[in-house]
Image (tube, grey):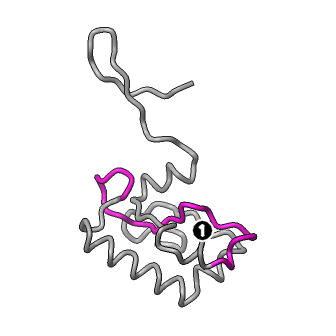
Amino acid sequence: MGAGHSAITGEKLTMARDFAKPFYNSAAWRKCRAAFIKERVRIDGGVCQRCGQELGYIVHHKIWLTPENINDPEITLNQSNLEYVGLVCHNKIEEGEEAPRYRFTPDGQVEAYSPP
């Protein structure tokens, strides 16, 4: 399997933007990430914090990293700014998709829909 592909699923992964690569390769991030995953596994077995259906796979920054905040540990290393998400949920976050919404049909059935 080539670089940039998941060893688990084989899917192509989005690589970190150039400004963030040194941060993601840092010992501080690796230590923070490992501690966060360990805590999530202790709390709920390491399931995705978004859907609760699949195992967590990626530690995601809720406040996205930018060139302006990449050196701010309150953003980059603060565990309250992290969430452990599965690959499907992470891809939805990255692509800007919202979680499915539901509504009742006229005959009382529940259906998923996408708002306009």
Is residue 19 rendered to the left or right of residue 75? right
Relative side of 28 to 11, left or right? right
Residue range in magenta is 49-72
Residue at point 58% right, 84% down? 25
102 vs 10: above or below: above
Amino acid at pointer 1: Met
Q: Position of residue 83 (x, y in %)?
A: 44, 64
Nearer-the-camera pick, 21 or 105: 105
Residue 100 percent coordinates (x, y): 42, 36
User: Which quarter of the rendering shows the C terminus?
Assistant: top right
User: Which residue is painted at 61% across and 62% down in the image?
Assistant: 64
Locate residue 32, reporting x and y percent. 47, 82
Which quadrant holds residue 113? top left
Left-right relation of 31 to 39: right
Q: Residue at x 38, y 28 (%)?
A: 102
Residue at (27, 9) in percent of width and height: 107
Query: Mark 1 sits on what residue?
Result: 15
Residue closest to the far top = 106
Q: Indicate yes or no whether the magenta region holds residue 39.
A: no
Outermost residue toward the bottom?
27
* Nearer to the camera, 3 or 66: 66
